[in-house]
Amino acid sequence: MRTVEDVVATVFGVERRSIDETSSPESVEGWDSMGHVNLLLALERNFKLSIAVADAIEMADVKKIKEILREYGVRA
Amino acid sequence: MNVTTSRPAEHERDGMRTLIAEAGAELLQSDAGTPERLSWLAQGLLRRSPMRLWEILRTRDTADIEQLAEPAALLSALAQRLLEDGRIRETEALRESATRWHVRLDGRVDHGLADAYARAGDTARAEERLRDLMKREPDNVDAVQLSYKLAKVSGRREQAHALLNRLVQMDPSMASAAFAYKERAGLGEGAGRPVRIAILSSYVVDPLIPFLDAECRGVGLSPSFYLGGFNQYVQEILSPSSALYSFNPEIVFLAVALEDLFPDISRMPPVEALARGHDEILERIGTLVRELRTRSKALIVVHELALTDWSPNGILDNRQPNGLVGWVETLNRALTESLAPHEAYLLPLRQVVGRVGTREGTDRKLRYMARMRFAEAALRELARYSMRYVKPLKGLTRKCVVVDLDGTLWGGVVGEVGADGIQLGPTAPGVEFVEFQEALLNLTRRGILLAACSKNNPDDVLPVLRDHPGMVLREQHFSALRIHWRNKADNLREIADELNIGLDSLVFVDDNPIERELIRLVLPEVLTVELPRDPSRFRPLLEDMSDFEVLALTREDEMRATGYQVARQRQALERASTSLNDYLHSLELRAAIGRARPAHLHRLVQLFNKTNQFNTTTRRYHTADVEGFLRSAAHHVYVLRVADRFGDHGLVGTAVVHDTGDTWWIEAFLLSCRVMGLSVETALLKRIVDDARSGNATRLVGEFVPTAKNGPAEDLYRRHGFRAALGAQAAIRWELDPRVDRMESPTWISVEASDA
């Protein structure tokens, strides 16, 4: 299964190797507010779930994304 | 399983062996002891001799196992290999060891074991493994399928039916619905209530039946179906001796396709043809419905007429006299009017198919090949929608929705963040909850009742219900309110009693999975909604439910909620004084009150700094301050411990009193929110009054300094007979005379002194 890092790399069109748990809007080119919406949709598609707006706002970096996905029962 | 397709020559194999041995040796020397290396070696052993690997592993402890790179994958693979070799005993031993090592094996291991037991005829053991598996992986379709087979061969018919329900629920595909439908025919009827459903159609609707069957079974009905012969609906309705009437249907669906009634529709018919078509179709369906009505008491549901294709007029369709979109619109409206006097309903087919999308939902090839019209997704949706007629017909309409508050009607916990902090308003996060509330309010217009059941302090919740600008639902929309800390199963029973409806009329909506689990377990007749974590899904989920339909709307339905509201206000006082009293007595509360000692220092500082709600002055004393009070003869610091029959709450209240001789000042008085609403504050206050009296004080003064959060403490002094005195700035001062004013502890608290 594709990991959160894989999805982030695909959405922003960057090398998979350049993404790790610390990756965030500050460090990834293109991760702006619109990019965040695209990422949200890609995560929902990839993990087959629906993410609350309150949670989407909290997704400040890859590590936090994983924590939140775990709340949805995803083993990320 | 060693499957070799081509066998290499002997010398080639020797060469290969050498190569592998060399590679292995190299790996052994490099990176000695890394998890990858160990796993690599174990993998090799797994392929060559799983038994050998098991022999090595079985004696290891958790620390050894943690050395492996992916222990779960390796051990699961080993278990699979052992099973393939028929080694059930070793697989069981491995399964036990895995638990000891805290390794979670793949669900396929339990499934494989169950399968092996089943084949050996050991049904009991097989089911035990399946139960474990389904507890761990509730979505495991294979496990349910195997459980079903076991139930079937053991002749447990009800259980087999229930497992088929679960199977279709987990995998709602046409294949699985058809499988279940076919199996049921062989099982014999279950315990459900019968319902006789007839479907008459101009096209092939056979594949709808398994979906409809599954929907009916899911709500405890045992349906029997009458499927009209292909395109014979006219004869069947018009002939009094037809099989349709001897079937004696309770509900008849009439599904006739527009192109079957009016084949010219796809050839750009001119205006005159359309006008003629309109009249003919109305006349034809009108006659059928009239005839059906005279010969049958069944509920009649006619599918709306729908265009399959884009209009041949293109974007000019709505400007042409022979425009098709407007024509169909008018036709359906006329049809609705002609149906109403015969108690027949028009099913909004275009909306139903639109839910899944016309492109996904209709299939031309099915039409050409099989005379079918709808594809899998649309059939499932149509079956679901059809239940909106079946359920009220069979008295399965749910009459009341019981909602939780925090996390369900608004985002966040109001007791923690306050009314200003909850998510509820015009922007997200918050708008999701507003729209969900609107959907709930819409239900009340249909005569469905609302009740709230929340573990909360009424003082936190009522201001939100009454004044929060984002609330769509107000106190008067709820026919019953249960806002306190008792268990929700009892509350639901009470609500059903109070509203005089059955538990099977309740729907329970709560964002907390633990509460949902409790209700599912204790009150299975209540319909517990599986609320997703994302609140933007709440409204569509509620609106997709087919449990709130009524076949007719009366003025009483619309008024019902108001009637309950009046009755509730009348009963509220009475209930508050009787049941609350009983409840408090049942807690067997014990309060221990005494002077603070240095040992309490840490907890006191914590209380002074963390307590926001029941805190009269919110003065944040730190360690040095409290130490000062304890040393000072002019300060009395009280501590309150509370216990009830469920356990000890610990040190949950304190008060700081400044003793100036004649006057005693209560500078701080606070309670942990854990014990709010139990009146333990009265016991503490009484002790202070008594001490002031024996200290010959003539005045006891309490201060209240309002903050955004300390509303619960606002009326502490008023409630206890203090008189309002002058307020300095924001503070309000209250006083009484300890020489004459007496105070009593509540009868449900046994108070003891805990002074050293």
Image: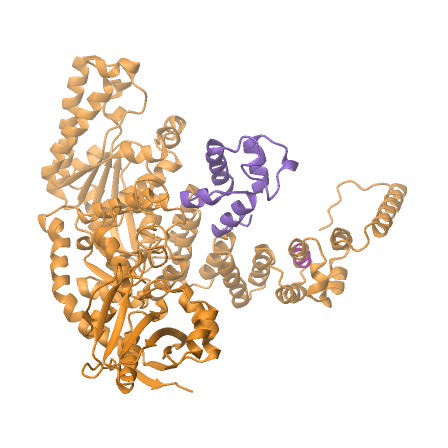
Chain colours: A purple, B orange
Task: Name the side, left or right, on which B718 lies relative to A66.
Answer: left
Picture residue at 75% right of the left edge, 41% below the top: B5
Residue B295 figure quarter: top left
Front residue (pair A23, B665) = B665
* Position above or below: A30 against B313: below
- Extent of the magenta region: B77-82
Secondary structure character of the magenta stretch overall: helix
Q: Is residue B669 visible?
A: yes
Q: In the image, is residue B598 part of the stretch drawn in magenta?
A: no
User: Eyeballing the image, is B745 above or below A34?
Assistant: below
Task: Please give the name of the residue rendered at 25% of the width and 45% of the height, measured from the top-left corner.
Answer: B439
In the image, residue B173 above or below residue B573:
above
Q: What percent of the width, then of the height, locates residue B655?
A: 35, 74
**Depth check, front residue: B578 or B650:** B650
Quadrant in which the C terminus of chain B is drawn: bottom left
**Residue B171, percent across and down?**
44, 47
Left or right position of B53 against B219: right
